Structure formats: structure tokens, C-alpha cells
Amino acid sequence: MIHPFLNTHFPHLILRPALFYSWKYGIRFEISMPGLDTEHPQNQQQIAERSTRIFDDVFLPHDEVLLVTDIHCAKNDAFLKKRPLNVYQKYIRDKEKRKKLQHLTLPEVFNEEDMVTHRFFLPCQKGDIRYKALLRVISFEDTNHPAKIGKGFPQAGVDLYFVNLTRKIIYHLYDDRGCDVIASRKEELRSLYEKRQNWILDDDREQIEKLFH
């Protein structure tokens, strides 16, 4: 399901960070407060506010969604057998819905030898996901916080993507620093740009403003 969708609506895109620099229609948002520790209460408040409000802008209640989790690891690493991935058990409410989880093993998306990417994806809707809690955990991925998804998998990298199949938009909160939102059509992003332009990362602001003017 994920790869036919990408081939049709995001041709030649490789689903990997940084999405903003890999696709022609995108916005890069600053999520945390520069220079402030991720776990600082003020920063946690801003991270939660920005990541969830952007998510709510991108995903409507009845949109069809794919929750994609990529685990990048060595080919001979058996950690998934020892420690099953718990993203879907913890953050998808419906046990029956979780049975639709699919898995692919791909050549490692960063083209490193002797590495593979385990790609898990689940069709669902926004209301099926405990997304506020999940976004909070994703924000810890670049830290040593015990709640982060990659805890216990020290040799592996983790990336999560929320794919809006209905609106053809991909949301990627890469960690506490920022969030990329890309779309197959520029106009799908215009309202998001107009509503949240104060949150755009300054380093990329000029490029993004040119896109919408």
C-alpha cells in the first residue's frame, strides 16, 4: 500500500529524512525552543503545542492514514525477534485494527552496506492513534530519555511518518527540533502555511515563502 501510493503521488521520492529537502512542495517548522533543553517544562509545552496543532491541521477525522515506522539496522541484527516493536501496541487503540499491521524488509534507505530497513505500516484514521502521546515520545528520539521509541535498540535508527492518503500529505516530526510536512500538490499546503507561518524554521523561510508567493 505505501509504495504504490508514493510512486503515484510522490514519484522518485525516497521516504527518509530530510523530506523537506527531497520534495518540491514542503514546509519545515521549528518545534522546540533553540538553546533550551528538550525536557524543560517551557520547551515541553511548546513542543506539544506545535507538533499537535500542525498534526491537527494536516489530519481530519475521516482522512485515511498510514502510520509508518522505519527501523534501520544491520542485516544480521535479530533485535526485532528479541524485543518486538511496541509502537502499534501502545499507540493504536483498537486491537482488531492492529491486526492489519504490515511489514517489509527493504535495502537500507540511506544506502549503507550491510544495513536494512524494516518498514512497518498500518492503515488507520486519526482517531485510532494516541497521537499526542506518540508525538511526545518522538520528540525524545534525539535524547537519552527513557520513553523514546529507540530505547533498547542502541544499534538501530527509528523514523516515524504519518501519511495522509486522502489529502496526499506526509507529516514527519523528526525529533524535538523540527517537523517536515510535504504534499503532492502545493495548494494542499497553502492554508497550513498561512496559518502557521510564524513557526517556519528561519533557515528555510526564504525558500518556503517563494513557494507560496
Image (cartoon, grey):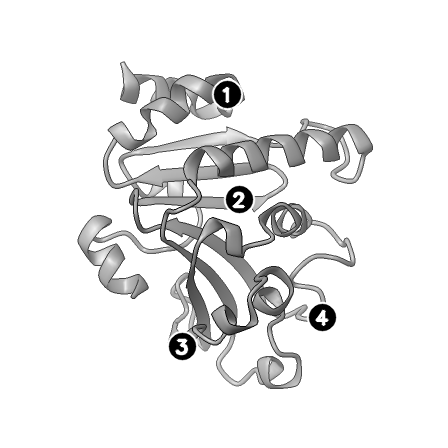
Reading the image, the residue beneath label 2 is: 173
Task: Measure the C-alpha gap from mark 4 to mark 3.
Answer: 20 Å
User: What is the number of the mark on residue 105?
Assistant: 3
Task: Point out residue 152 in the picture as x, y percentages from the top left corner.
Answer: 71, 70
Task: Point out residue 91 in the picture as x, y percentages from the top left corner.
Answer: 61, 60
* Disc 3, SS: strand
Position of residue 162 relative to residue 39, above or below, is below
Q: Amino acid at mark 1?
A: Asp
* Disc 2, SS: strand
Q: The C terminus appears in which quarter of the rendering?
A: top left
Q: Amino acid at mark 2?
A: Leu
* Disc 1, SS: helix
Task: Point out residue 77 in the picture as x, y percentages from the top left corner.
Answer: 57, 82
Does the CB distance between marks 4 and 2 fall below 8 Å? no
Front residue (pair 82, 167): 167
* Disc 4, SS: loop
Reading the image, the residue beneath label 1 is: 202
Q: Is residue 188 left or right of residue 90?
A: left
Q: Is residue 10 left or right of residue 58?
A: left
At label 3, counting other C-alpha atoms closer than 10 Å, the crowd grade (few under 14, some 14-19, many 20 or more) is some
Q: Amino acid at mark 4?
A: Gly
